[in-house]
Image: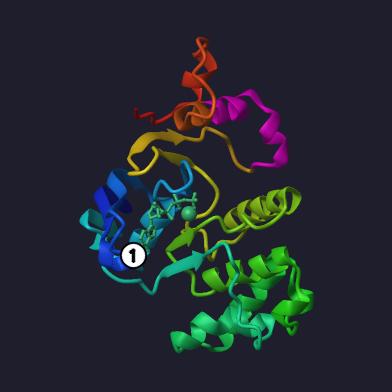
Amino acid sequence: MAFGVIKNVRKVFQLDEIGWTALEPVVALDDATFEFEEGELVALLGPSGCGKTTLLRIVGGLIAKSAGSVAIAGREVTKPMGDYGFVFQAPSLMPWRNVLDNVLFPMEILRKNDAAARRHAHELLELVGLSGFLSARPHQLSGGMQQRVALCRALVHRPRLLLMDEPFGALDELTRMEMNDLLLRIRHETKAISEAVYLSDKVVIFSKRPARVVKEMAIPLAYPRSQKVRFTPAFTAAERIASEALGVVAPTADEAPAHAAQGAGRQ
Ligand SMILES: Nc1ncnc2c1ncn2[C@@H]1O[C@H](COP(=O)(O)OP(=O)(O)OP(=O)(O)O)[C@@H](O)[C@H]1O
Ligand SMILES: [Mg+2]
């Protein structure tokens, strides 16, 4: 069985959850189904409001689903698991704690804030280029630096599954590209977290709400990847297939390079 199995997941937000009785129930997800392997990085792509965040929150055990099943490592997810890491769009660091103590916060909750944990926190902060800021407070950091702290905090307990919801969405394009490179480096340069889930091996594309999976595509680009890969035919072909599946560009008649990059295609 695959590491992550998401099967026929449906989510309807009922009136009482919204609090406005005038609103109809919202069908956020309708029959979302896909699988992923341990160590694979899966990106969810789809129109705004189609249900991606909802699905992430269900997979993370933060909200209940209305129907279907979500199993991670053979266990049905019903509540947040200790071996998960989360990164959201806002870094939400504790303003009164310094950088190191923000990163160590999950270890305090888990009552494992020992010397090994501190060593690991130092390693992670060094990896993201923040070893000079261990005792800085969040307000003394830029947005990108704060998000790097949030990433270290999500990784400090060596999660088996890392869930990220537009973690770099609030950053400018250049910083976002740097953060993407950083994720690739973390993924491939550290043995400690090599089983966790980092940059895209697979892209799962959703329809408009209620979201269904319209396409799953394997990304056939070799590692190590660098920004140069963005200018290769394989990259542009993959980008084009995803854009077509999303309906951002109309399908083209010339399908040859598209099929070459399609991998595990599913319509
Ligand atoms: N707590 C909630 N109560 C009621 N409706 C909700 C709730 N959370 C989300 N929704 C609705 O579910 C639908 C999907 O929302 P969701 O946040 O999952 O979209 P998304 O794909 O993440 O969009 P975006 O790309 O803009 O982040 C939307 O119509 C939204 O209004
Ligand atoms: Mg969202």
**In magenta segment, residue 139:** no
**Circle 1 is placed at which residue position?**
18
Identify the amino acid type marked 1: Ile
Residue 178 percent coordinates (x, y): 72, 52
Relative height, residue 115 to residue 148 (above, below): below
Q: Nearer the viewer, residue 186 or 77?
A: 77
Q: Where is residue 130 shown, x and y percent of the image?
A: 74, 71
Q: Secondary structure at mark 1?
A: helix
Count the marks: how many? 1
Give 120 or 168, whichever is nearer the viewer.
168
Specify whether tag 1 is near ligand 1 (CB below 8 Å): yes
Q: For the stretch drawn in magenta, what is the main secondary structure? A: helix
Q: Which quadrant holds residue 101?
A: bottom right
**Residue at left 27%, top 45%?**
30
* Furthest residue toward left: 67
156 displayed left or right of 44: right
Q: Can residue 1 be seen by looking at this rendering? A: no
Looking at the image, residue 53 sits to the left or right of residue 177; the answer is: left
Residue 229 vertical placement versus 75 (above, below): above
Q: Is residue 1 left or right of residue 84?
A: left
Question: Which colour style is shown?
Answer: rainbow
Q: Which residues are magenta?
A: 225-240
- Camera-side residue of 96 and 154: 96
Label 1, residues with CA under 10 Å away: few <14, some 14-19, many ≥20: few
